[in-house]
Amino acid sequence: MAVSLALIVVLGLAADYLFRKLKLPGLVGMLIVGILVGPYVLGLMRPEMMQVSADFRKIALIVILLRAGFELHRDTLNRVGRAALIMSAVPAVFEILGVMWVAPKWLGITSLEAAILGSILAAVSPAVVVPLMIDFMDRGRGAKKGIPTLILGASSVDDVFVIVLFTIFLGMYGGGKVNLWAKLAEIPISITLGILVGFIPGYLLYKLFTRYDWRPPKRTLVVLGVSIFLTWLETAVEQWVPLASLLGVMAIGFVILEKAEPIAHLISQKLKKLWVFAELLLFVLVGAQVNIHVAWKAGLAGTAVIFVGLVFRSIGTWVSLIGTPYNWKEKLFCVVAYIPKATVQAAIGAVPLAAGVASGEVILAVAVLSILLTAPIGAIGIMILGERILDHGEKSPYTFKSLREKLQLPRVGERVRSKRYGTVWKIIEERETWISAPGVAASPNGQIPAILIRYWKEGSGDGPGTGKTMTHRYSQLDPSFHDHWEVLYDW
């Protein structure tokens, strides 16, 4: 397995570098590497690696969904909430109907089998969509109207909705009695419970992190461990109650961000570094699951079914955005962002075959083909259209986030020690501002971002803000914070 990990890291990084040089999403290169080294082409991936592939992919998905949670501001969610809720269901329903319309004629399957196929194809891939949306959010693209947040939230709930429909159709095929309304009720129950089980540990972690000043990597590992436990909990209770654990994972980040934004940003910064490795695992292993020989069997008919499904899905996405403040270009971006398929199709594509569905092989072939066609095309389309369409204000607040990360500045509440005098101070305030820098290249209107940090000397006065305080400014023109200070932690 160690050799397989080495292949994933070395070849995955090489593919990522090459595709970025070509101005294409690096994840496309990783998917291709996975297909090539997987068991269905060159067979370089060890069998034991494929056996634990699902666990590794789940952990990697948890990392990116945690990052998503740490980016979900309440005000932005309030702005896009209605549209996100509609987009989580309507496009999927349209796609299923489109597949049910053409698949019986073109693939020679029954209407119920077409419904099963449609429910597999209708799931958008958070593994592809979420990282790209977070990248836009990191750079402040689309921040004004909250478009990345809209797609991020809608795509996460979309999977819950579609998997419940898949379960209903598969149950109907088995001939057993399926209580349709009870099954549909599982959708809001699953979403509500998922968010609830995320809110509770999120709040407890917030209290823990504010009481004890742990190092950011340790906080990050604790959050990751709790999130992995939540996904196990979903499996443990699934026979009694539905639970959307991945929404709970996002809720953990959301709660910590709302309660303690400085701590949330510190954890998010470490998750961003962890994502470098997790991304390699996720996309190379997803690619390794793709059997191109099976996909080949789907042929032109399978391609045509996928295409019709995407057309119906695009219409459904556009309908979902009626009444929103987005212009036609922004709606087009949302349509393209809802194209990629990967994780859900790889996870459940073979389930109908294992369950004895007569057209199980055909369903699996089309599901695999959908990954090969839509994941690269969708990712490339998102990147190209996002750069051209999403708004990007000259003085985006996200500029301060990148500056803070680049300078590795402390956050409010952290304690620091003067390297020169050995005195201990506490950060009690930080303010963002713009300063004149006419000589600096690429500065909007001759200004660059700067962060003002206010220090309080511990033990002076009756509490923070009383006694001895001082303020320092940090920008690309000022001395480095780490030249004069070091951050202190309890553990």
Image (spheres, grey):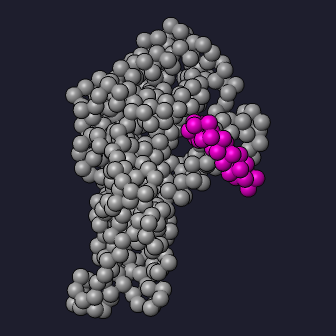
Give the vertical position of 136 relative to 482 (above or below): above
Please state the horizontal and vertical placement of residue 14, each as a whole percent of the image.
69, 46
Secondary structure mostly seen in magenta is helix
Please state the horizontal and vertical placement of residue 129, each as a whole percent of the image.
46, 39
Based on the picture, tell me whether residue 25 belongs to the magenta stretch.
Answer: yes
Would residue 1 be found to the left or right of residue 90 on screen?
right
Give the vertical position of 242 relative to 3 (above or below): above
Based on the picture, tell me whether residue 413 belongs to the magenta stretch.
Answer: no
Residue most toward the front?
Answer: 439
Q: Is residue 199 visible?
A: yes
Please tell me in which quadrant of the rendered image residue 363 appears. top right
Please state the horizontal and vertical placement of residue 249, each as a whole percent of the image.
41, 53
Q: Is residue 413 visible?
A: no
Residues in magenta? 1-28
Q: Work out whether residue 385 or residue 370 is closer to the camera in this orientation and state it.
A: 385
For the point 39% across and 69% down, the residue is: 474
For the point 23% across and 45% down, the residue is: 78
Give the vertical position of 376 relative to 61 (above or below): above
How many circles with numbers are drawn on the protein?
0
For the point 39% across and 62% down, the residue is: 265
Please state the horizontal and vertical placement of residue 91, each as a whole percent of the image.
36, 26
Q: Work out whether residue 147 or residue 51 is closer to the camera in this orientation and state it.
A: 147
Would residue 289 be found to the left or right of residue 344 on screen?
right
For the point 46% across and 80% down, the residue is: 485
Would residue 249 be found to the left or right of residue 327 on screen?
right
Please tell me in which quadrant of the rendered image residue 337 appears. top left
